[in-house]
Image (tube, rainbow, N blue to C red):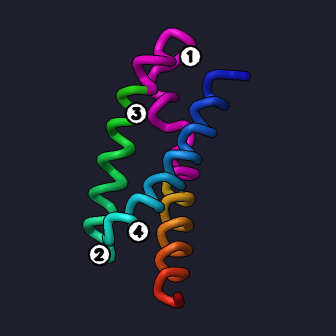
Amino acid sequence: MEPLNVIYWIRLGLGAFTGVLCVLLGVNNIFSGIMLSLAVYVISDRILRQIFIAKVSKPSEITKTGLSIYVTAWIFFWILLYTLLINV
């Protein structure tokens, strides 16, 4: 599998993880959620950069790859799980 495809799928999983983490930590404020999500993204970007830097042609592709799916998964899982917990 291509390195950028691997990064894409890792970002999808991390977005879902961050959404779940927001619910588990009781984050119900958008600003706190954004800060948590940004922190997870920056930390994961540094780790992925160390792992994949030699395997891609442009290092900037590592940061850009999967950004939109990360944000989408984070918001989707956060809203979905938060809504389910409110209705229980």
Q: Residues within 10 Å of mark 1 (few under 14, many from 20)?
A: some
Q: Which amino acid does label 1 sit on?
A: Val
Tell me how far mark 3 sits from mark 2, CA to CA. Answer: 24 Å
Earlier in the chain: of badge 3 and badge 1, it is: 3
Q: How crowded is mark 3: few (under 14 residues within 10 Å), some or many (20 or more)?
A: some
Which residue range is magenta in the image?
Answer: 48-70
State how many labels appear. Answer: 4
Place residue 35 in its image quadrant: bottom left
Earlier in the chain: of badge 4 and badge 2, it is: 4
Tell me how far mark 2 sits from mark 1, CA to CA. Answer: 37 Å
Earlier in the chain: of badge 2 and badge 1, it is: 2
Residue lying farthest to the right in this orientation: 1
Specify the quadrant that holds the N terminus. top right
The residue that disc 2 covers is 29
- In depth, the one of 2 and 18 nearer the eye is 18
SS state under label 1: loop
- In depth, the one of 79 and 87 nearer the eye is 87
The residue that disc 4 covers is 23
Q: Residues within 10 Å of mark 4 (few under 14, many from 20)?
A: some
Task: Determine which of the numbered discs, if any, sits on residue 85 in the image.
Answer: none
Apparent side of residue 4 relative to residue 24 in the rendered image (left or right): right
Task: Determine which of the numbered discs, if any, sits on residue 56 in the image.
Answer: 1
Taking 56 as reference, is 80 above or below it? below
Q: Which amino acid does label 4 sit on?
A: Val
Tell me how far mark 4 sits from mark 3, CA to CA. Answer: 22 Å
Give me the residue at 46% from left, 21% from top. Answer: 59
Earlier in the chain: of badge 4 and badge 3, it is: 4
Give me the residue at 57% from left, 38% from top. Answer: 10
Tell me how far mark 1 sits from mark 4, CA to CA. Answer: 34 Å
**Position of residue 64 measured from the top left corner of the image (x, y, whole percent):** 49, 38
